[in-house]
Image (cartoon, grey):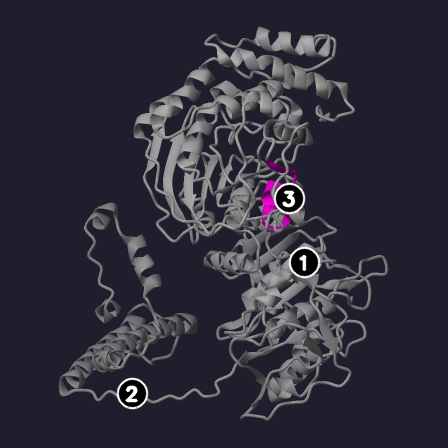
Amino acid sequence: MTDLFDPKDDRASACTDAARSLLPLFSGDTKLSRRDLNNAMVAAHGGTDADGCWTQRDSFEVLEHALALHLVSSAPALQSPADIQFALDLLDRLPTQTVRSEDQIDWQQFSTPVDIAAVVVLLAAAQPTDVVLEPSAGNGLLVAQLPRVAALHLNEIDPARRARLAASFSGAEVSGHDGAAIGSTMTNLPRPSLILMNPPFSRSVGRGSDALAAVRHLQAALKRLLPGGRLVAVMPDWFANSARMADIWAMTFAGMALRTSIRLTNGYGKHGTGVSVRLYVIDKAVGDTTTVTISRRNVGELIEALIVPKRGSPQIEALGTPVKRGGAVSLLRAMKSRPAVAPRIFRAPTRNEVLPVGYQVLETPAPIAEQVGVYLPYRPSRIVFDAAGEHPTSLVESVAMGSIPAPIPSHIPHLPERTVSERLLSSSQLETVVYAGHAWTQFIPGMFTCDKEGVGLVLDAAGRQYRKGFFLGDGTGAGKGRQVAAIILDNWLAGRRKAIWVSKNEALHADAVRDWTALGGMAADVQPLSRWKIDEPVTMSEGVLFVTYPTLRSGRGDASRLEQIIAWAADDFDGVIAFDEAHEMGGVAGGEGAMGTKAGSLQGIAGVLLQNRLPAARVLYASATGASEVNNLAYAVRLGLWGPETSFADREAFISEIRQGGIAAMELVARDLKATGLYTARALSFAGVEYDILRHELTPDQIDVYDRYADAWGIIHRNMEKALEITGVVDALDGATKNAGAKAAARSRFESCKQRFFGSLLLSCKLPTVLAAVRQHLDAGQSVVLQLVSTAEAILNRRLGELTPDQRAELDIDLSPREFL
């Protein structure tokens, strides 16, 4: 787009003259017509649009500029809903914008109608001490009716509109950042106590088409807002507390209070679109995020239902003199007679700056602490961080692992400064980021192509090199999710803006979002693959694609999720593939089971194929049971455990020989991996933990109940054996088994059902003693944590699935131990 306000461009000066010539027309009661607009443009440019002197889209931009000038100087104070009538009358006199340009669509330049802007300003309840921000200001129509405030900051990425803002709002700070990134690009400016915004709905800078663009802008603005401040946003109609948006809604409004929700189904008619929008009033304070939505067709119907929620007290930062609202003449003179602005008190230097994580290398490994049992207190063996804090709880590693130092690393992570200074990551977690990056500088010896007949790699001089991976084997409490997020963030800030996060189930998506946002990311960056149908391309141009193992293996007809992911990543993908709960791929090699030889698991095969198809990917495995069983390493094809320059020709040879060596051989594998910088495994220390056994003495009544049920199960057992004879599984004459599989399955089903029954029965017997102990601890002012061994959720779901509609209407479900009988 040509910058119409470039001082060297005669068209810019002509557009300014055209806007000024329209100002007198706003003062009367007559309607402004397209002819008035065209006449102003012809007079200012000396020619028509047919001559190429200007375009119809230019004329509408000039109309909005003139409207902003008029509102700044002449709009009445908005003190009650009745005052909005002024905006309705003015809107009725304006011509409809009937022409769109490609630039307008690309930049999502659909300005706020003057009546909706009046509603937003009224709901904002601006105060004289407010620092106001509009992150995507356009031509300024959203803030033009604001009363006098302490400071006004207008951000607009389009240079032409940005120049018009400077002409309309003489005392405002005007900037040109991406509205979705203001959390990091505006940290040197005072934080706003009030934000008014109408973000782009479906396009983002650097992303192109982006269905979540508005959410990204809203989340960035909420982070920028002062605690106690208010944000009023015009959002797309799809952004609501619905089943589809539930996770994103919850993350966006965490720590916020939703004061007002409004839906307008036809509020943009004058601006050339019939889109429905929602207005949200959000206070940055703890409160409810559910409220009744007021739905009306337009602002005229909304006025009678409008209530302005009372504002809280924001943490106002010290500023200079307030921005004064002047008349039209003073506005047009602003460039010549701009008064001196008092010095502002800015915030301290930003703490969100991306900096290298400093550490010192130890040529001699750090000394080993005193052994406790079979564990050693954990310490980074080769590096000492300049400013990182210790892990919140003590970590240990096995004596075998602790006696092996890691190699000297070469990778220096780059992370936001606050991740270190505010101890969002401990030294142990930062060490993982260092060694993961170090591992990814290495490649597996040899060149390979994918085996067309299986899941292996074939040596081929014309093939490609495969980047080595890293295995995070930490146990519960070490923060594997936070470490995975930090590793992805390190690569994100290095320019690798696509990542794949594979985990056990959809419920863990919320955990991934939690860990990602805790380090400064936005919830909308982590999107589940399930948002896209299996036969359509993933339209997210950058972000973290969250995939579950069941989804990874799924397919329908000729379409598969695996191919969908690979198409999104592209063949040259060099971002992170994080296999969280990586043991879910443990069955890839198959093996011997209770019922004979087992084939490789589909999700294990899919995980290996994903690694094979993306040779440059930075593969991260995360599992607390990584080295517990040899099959749990069969999927780890990027660790270089077999193949050229190793002792094992292929994966099958590795599995066979290590299995023969037992746990000792696995321990040696883990030690070698740590020595090469490809593996780490820490666990929480149990130092200082004490336990007592709470013993329950069965009462005579409980013993009698147990005996009666034991007799009942004996009857069932005998009848089951008779049933096996009747059905031909067992020969009735000599007792020989005719169908071993059927007999084993029947007895297995019987015994598992019986064990679950008596487990529940004994649990119920112990409850009187447990509850008495709980009351005793609570009375002593102590906290009690109870572990639920089983919630019977799977049984409940099965029972519900078996019900007819009539049975569902009158639920009568028994999930007690009697149900097993």
Find residue 354 and name its label: 1
Three-letter amino acid code at disc 3?
A: Ser
Name the front one of labels 3 and 1.
Answer: 1
Sequence-wise, the earlier of marks 2 and 3 is 3
The answer to whether 302 appears left or right of 27 in the picture is: left
Of the 4 image quadrants, the one containing the C terminus is bottom left
Sequence-wise, the earlier of marks 3 and 1 is 1
Please name the residue that numbered disc 3 is placed on: 541
Q: Secondary structure at mark 1?
A: strand
The answer to whether 669 appears left or right of 768 in the picture is: right
Residue 7 percent coordinates (x, y) = 75, 25
CA distance separating discs 2 and 3: 57 Å
Q: Which residues are magenta?
A: 172-185
Three-letter amino acid code at disc 2?
A: Leu
Q: Secondary structure at mark 2?
A: loop
Residue 800 percent coordinates (x, y) = 29, 55
Please name the residue that numbered disc 2 is placed on: 694
Q: Image quadrant of residue 327?
A: top right
Sequence-wise, the earlier of marks 2 and 1 is 1
